[in-house]
């Protein structure tokens, strides 16, 4: 609720750019792909992902597509810290 809920929702929407951009760069319909991916995840298929070779959503583990968790965690952490720094700068400029 409140400001925290708004921030978390905005953060989640920002993360949605990743599969959208992947689908778009693969020449797929990004809206249809992201919608289907959301539905599969909501149905409990946690390993569903975008298969750019087949142009559809498949079980990405069965396709042997994996990424080390440290890579994803580091990227998200660095991006979040960057945004926090930008927001702090905006606060400082607004106060002046």
Image (cartoon, helix red, strand yellow):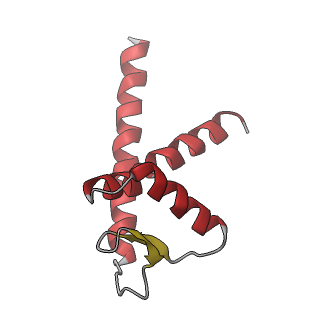
Residue sitting at 43 percent across and 23 percent down?
91
Q: In this view, does 23 lie above or below 46?
A: above
Above or below, comparing residue 90 to residue 4 in the picture: above
Say whether residue 74 is left or right of residue 46.
left
Residue positioned most to the right: 1
Q: Is 39 on the left or on the right of 90, as rendered? A: right
**Residue 60 appears in which quarter of the rendering?**
bottom left
Tell me which corner region of the image, top left, top right, bottom left or bottom right, holds residue 54. bottom left
Q: Is residue 25 above or below residue 41?
A: above
**Residue 78: x percent and y percent?**
33, 54
Residue shown at 36% from the left, 81% from the top = 66
Indicate the quadrant containing the C terminus: top left, top right, bottom left or bottom right.
top left
Q: Position of residue 21 (x, y in %)?
A: 33, 52
Which residue is painted at 32% across and 70% down in the image? 71
Number of marks in picture: 0
Quarter of the figure with the N terminus: top right
Regarding residue 77, the answer to whether it shows in the image is no
Q: Nearer the viewer, residue 92 or 7?
A: 7
Residue shown at 34% from the left, 81% from the top: 65
64 and 77: which is toward the camera: 64
Q: Residue 23, relative to residue 94: is it above or below?
A: below
Q: Where is residue 89 in the image (x, y as percent from the top left)?
A: 35, 27
Q: Do we see residue 88 in this rendering?
A: yes
Residue 51 figure quarter: bottom left
């Amino acid at each position: 609720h409140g400001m925290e809920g708004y921030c978390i929702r905005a953060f989640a929407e920002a993360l949605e750019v990743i599969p959208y951009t992947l689908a778009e760069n693969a020449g797929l319909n990004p809206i249809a792909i992201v919608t289907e991916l959301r539905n599969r995840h909501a149905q409990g298929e946690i390993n569903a992902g975008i298969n750019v070779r087949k142009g559809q959503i498949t079980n990405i583990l069965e396709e042997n597509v994996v990424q080390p968790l440290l890579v994803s965690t580091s990227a998200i952490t660095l991006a979040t810290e960057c945004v926090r720094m930008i927001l702090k700068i905006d606060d400082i400029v607004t106060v002046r």
